[in-house]
Image (cartoon, helix red, strand yellow):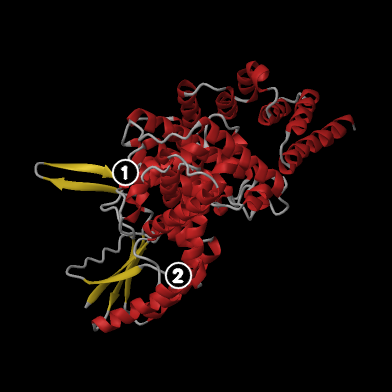
Amino acid sequence: MLYAVLCYNSEEAVAAWSREEEDRVMSDLAAVERKYAAAGKLGPVARLMPTTAATTLRKAPGETIVVDGPFAETKEQFLGFFLVDMETLDAAIDFAKELAVANPGVGAYEIRPLRVFKPGGALEAL
Amino acid sequence: MSELSWIDLALSSARPQAMGALLRYFRDLDLAEEAFQEACLRAVRAWPDKGPPRDPVAWLIFVGRNSGIDHLRKRARQQPLPPEETLSDLEDVEDDLAERLDGSHYRDDILRLLFVCCHPDLPATQQIALALRIVCGLSVRQIARAFLVSEAAMEQRITRAKARIAAAGLPFETPDAVSRAERLGAVSAMVYLVFNEGYSAGETQRADAPFCEEAIRLARLLLRLFPSEPEIMGLTALLLLQHSRKDARFDADGQIVLLEEQDRSLWDGRMIREALALIDKALRHRAPGPYQIQAAIAALHARATRPEDTDWEEIDLLYQSLERLQPSPVVTLNRAVAVSKRQGPQAALDLIEPLEDRLSGYFYFHGLRGGLLKQLGRDREARAAFERAIALATTPAEAAHIRQHLDGLSRGVVAETK
């Protein structure tokens, strides 16, 4: 089963990380990523810009409305995701637990099984 | 991350909202600050065991409000009660902890808090100090160090600023659309000032008071509160673009490195990309403003992988529209740099000579003028201009940078006479 592991946290808190904290968390996460990539279980990983950079297109009958900002005003924002291929939900939860160890503190990982997946592959890494 | 550091983060990110609400309740900056401090102390005691509350901001407002009221009661035992109307909104104090202020309420609270700090009666340095103290929560010691004054002097400066604000009266009415826009304009200018204070000094000298980062944090806060204001997008983008060059702007000895000589691989690509995304968003509104134009100029520099790829023609045009929107000799001075790239030093010199009256006390005027004269081979005049610039330099790095030009000139002169 393919799972998306969606990362939620207060983006304000994440934005307040010092460079050292940021670097440490990113390198700890990269270590987890390497492990799962080596096992052939890791797909694309994405980190999103802050919601202030977001634009939302709302569908409405007959027209669409483009508004500034994220889809929903919430305490915790959707910050990024990992895509993993796991035998079981437990395995996916274990993966998220490893992420939580690499990046401790508050926030949440939502584990969502995928229904459709089109890997693309035409894009360059950022 | 250690336990205490997440609490720290939660407290500092809750600060503007909680302080804004407490200021609305107590209508007194000192009392609001004390109440917030007390709430933070209790959070540090309570949160490690119980975990963070579901809504830390509401928790801090509730606890802060109660402790402020306690404080007022104690004070009332020693002196007569304050008039009822100074304790506005206190009747709902028994309300449930889960009281959730709606977004617009928070928005006006925070805007008021920021607006109070940039009161027109206050000189710029006091606005900056007050904002860093009250909104960002930097300690007096941190701010004092950054301004190179003693802690006592800074304490006094902040106290005086607060007294001035109290005397002038705080704006507590809910702002209408026009006064909200005015406040937003004043607050944006103050955020820009905070940034500039850090930018011109070079953050390296202020490692423990990161003005630039605080300014960016404030800009992001404004942007979250006013997600559809293209000028706030422009302001945030501008700050991000300027800050993206921070590692390239000074060399290992703390000397200024000019834009053209900077190692562009040191520029922070992540900040640049975010800024470009914000400029794109802003452009859709088709409501250009000074911050958007300045951001667009900075973006043209950021987009050039090599100095010679810089689109000076577009930069010149953007400065021209900035001159129309916000006529200022400093803008013209900046345009002169673009003009010198496109049409040579003489054209740029012709453009800035008429500014002498108004910019005679401005470091950059004499620095640029000296540079242009030097390019034209008018060394003696160049030397005089550089010497005036040195006299006006506000940081050692600025002075050192001009001295390099002077040294270059001296060597040139010696070489000529040989």
Indicate the amino acid at tag 1.
Ser
In the image, is residue A82 above or below residue B70?
below
Residue at 49% across / 54% down in the picture?
Answer: B36
Taking depth in this image into account, of B312 and B86 the one nearest to the observer is B86
Residue at 70% across / 49% down in the picture?
Answer: B151
Q: Mark 2 = which residue?
A: B46
**Mark 2 belongs to which subunit?**
B
Which element type, helix, strand or loop, lies under badge 1? Answer: helix
Q: Mark 1 = which residue?
A: B104
Taking depth in this image into account, of A73 and B238 the one nearest to the observer is A73
Instruction: Say whether residue B123 is left or right of residue B16.
Output: right
Indicate the amino acid at tag 2.
Ala
Instruction: Say whether residue A20 is left or right of residue A3.
Output: right
In the image, is residue B128 above or below residue A121?
above
Which element type, helix, strand or loop, lies under badge 2? Answer: helix
Q: Is residue B305 visible?
A: no
